[in-house]
Image (cartoon, rainbow, N blue to C red):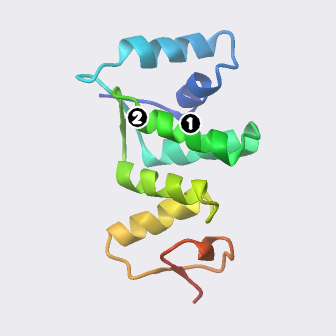
């Protein structure tokens, strides 16, 4: 398995750099295999969503499509895939941010009865409560 940093994922998804984007495409589409997949950590996934939203101004629909693309790619192993999928659904439904949804999903998986927050937007997601 080969770990992939956020910048590799961003260059692959956006295809916006004449030098780095082809290299990222080469890595993901030709170099990685199901036997030797690329590893996407939960941190890299969170950063990728953040960069697509804040740095590139992508819409929620476009970000959801990018996350779905990564989850469906056979040569990528996404850490905490179920929580990422749950967060993507929350984002798609407009319930809260992707990061907040991951926080709630990870907490639930670890046995938390709820996650306390002051964030009003996060409160729209299941699992969050005001203190």
* x then y, percent, for residue 97: 62, 59
Disc number placed over residue 72 in the picture, else none: 2
* x then y, percent, for residue 36: 27, 22
Element marked by disc 2: helix
Q: In which quarter of the image is residue 33?
A: top left
Q: Mark 1 points at which residue?
A: 66
Quarter of the figure with the C terminus: bottom right
The reply to whether residue 80 is visible in this rendering is: no
Residue at 55% over, 35% down: 6
The reply, left or right, for residue 8 in relation to residue 60 is: left
* x then y, percent, for residue 4: 45, 30
Quarter of the figure with the N terminus: top left
Residue at 49% over, 33% down: 69
Using the image, determine if residue 41 lies above or below residue 2: below
The foreground one among 37 and 91 is: 91
Q: In which quarter of the image is residue 124?
A: bottom right
Q: How many labels does the image show?
A: 2
Q: Residue furthest bottom?
A: 131
Residue at 65% over, 25% down: 14
Q: Residue furthest left?
A: 35
The reply, left or right, for residue 13 in relation to residue 76 is: right
Crowd tier of the residue under label 1, counting other residues whose Cα lies within 10 Å: few below 14, some 14–19, many 20 or above: many
* x then y, percent, for residue 38: 37, 28
The reply to whether residue 69 is visible in this rendering is: yes
Mark 2 or 1 closer to N-term? 1
Element marked by disc 1: helix
Using the image, determine if residue 14 lies above or below residue 48: above
């Amino acid at each position: 398995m080969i770990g992939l940093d956020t910048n590799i994922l961003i260059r692959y998804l956006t295809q916006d750099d004449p030098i780095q984007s082809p290299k990222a495409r080469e890595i993901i589409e030709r170099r990685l295999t199901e036997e030797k997949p690329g590893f996407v950590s939960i941190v890299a996934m969170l950063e990728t969503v953040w960069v697509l939203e804040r740095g590139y101004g992508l819409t929620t629909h476009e970000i959801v499509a990018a996350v779905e693309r990564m989850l469906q790619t056979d040569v990528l192993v996404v850490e905490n895939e179920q929580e990422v999928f749950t967060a993507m659904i929350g984002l798609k439904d407009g319930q809260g941010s992707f990061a907040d949804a991951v926080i709630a999903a990870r907490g639930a998986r670890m046995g938390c009865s709820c996650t306390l927050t002051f964030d009003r937007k996060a409160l729209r997601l299941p699992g969050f409560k005001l203190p």
